[in-house]
């Protein structure tokens, strides 16, 4: 387990221990043909990256962000995966697409 040395490390650890759930008005759509995701909020629709779609589609309140990261680490084997997940989660929460449970 990595040691927490900075406030940023502490915030990261707190975020990854959280469970998130999609907002009731938010719908994730997956296109199997184009292998892409979109998010529909009722007011607007946005295209998502494949990673963002995979992350947000797992926000059911059953797994914390650590669990989601573990699941996706095989499919997206990149050293920056944890930071990318943190950015996706933070941005989605700011938009109101997900909320902490």
Image: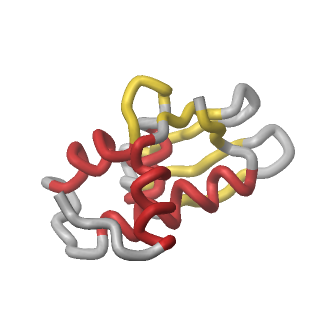
Image quarter of residue 12: bottom left
In this view, the residue farthest toward the right is 43
Would you place residue 35 above or below residue 65 in this image? below
Q: Quadrant of residue 65?
A: top left
Please determine whether, in this image, residue 50 is positioned above or below residue 60.
below
- Horizontal arrangement in the rendering, residue 68 relative to residue 10 (left or right): left
- Colour approach in the figure: secondary structure
- Depth check: 9 or 90 in front? 9
Q: Residue at x 19, y 55 (%)?
A: 73
Image coords of residue 80 (percent x, y): 29, 74
Q: Residue at x 46, y 38 (%)?
A: 57
Return the residue nearer the eye: 19 or 29: 19
Which of the 4 image quarters holds residue 81? bottom left
Residue 27 left/right relative to 16 = right
How many numbered circles does the render carry?
A: 0
Viewed as shown, does residue 69 lie left or right of 21? left
Residue 29 versus residue 50 in the image, above or below: above
Foreground: 81 or 37?
Answer: 81
Rendering coords of residue 85 (x, y %) = 41, 60
Quarter of the image with the N terminus in it: bottom left
Establish if 94 lies above or below 7: above
Residue sitting at x 59%, y 29%: 101
Q: Residue at x 75, y 42 (%)?
A: 41
Q: Nearer the viewer, residue 15 or 58?
A: 15
The x and y percentages for residue 67 are: 29, 40
């Amino acid at each position: 387990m990595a040691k927490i040395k900075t406030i940023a490390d502490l915030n990261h650890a707190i975020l990854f221990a959280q469970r998130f759930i999609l907002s009731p008005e938010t719908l994730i759509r997956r296109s199997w043909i184009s292998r892409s995701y979109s998010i529909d909020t009722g007011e607007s629709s946005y295209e998502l990256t494949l990673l963002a779609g995979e992350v947000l589609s797992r926000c059911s309140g059953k797994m914390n962000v650590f669990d989601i990261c573990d699941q996706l680490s095989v499919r997206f084997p990149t050293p920056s995966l944890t930071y990318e997940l943190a950015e996706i989660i933070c941005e989605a929460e700011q938009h109101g697409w997900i909320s902490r449970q």
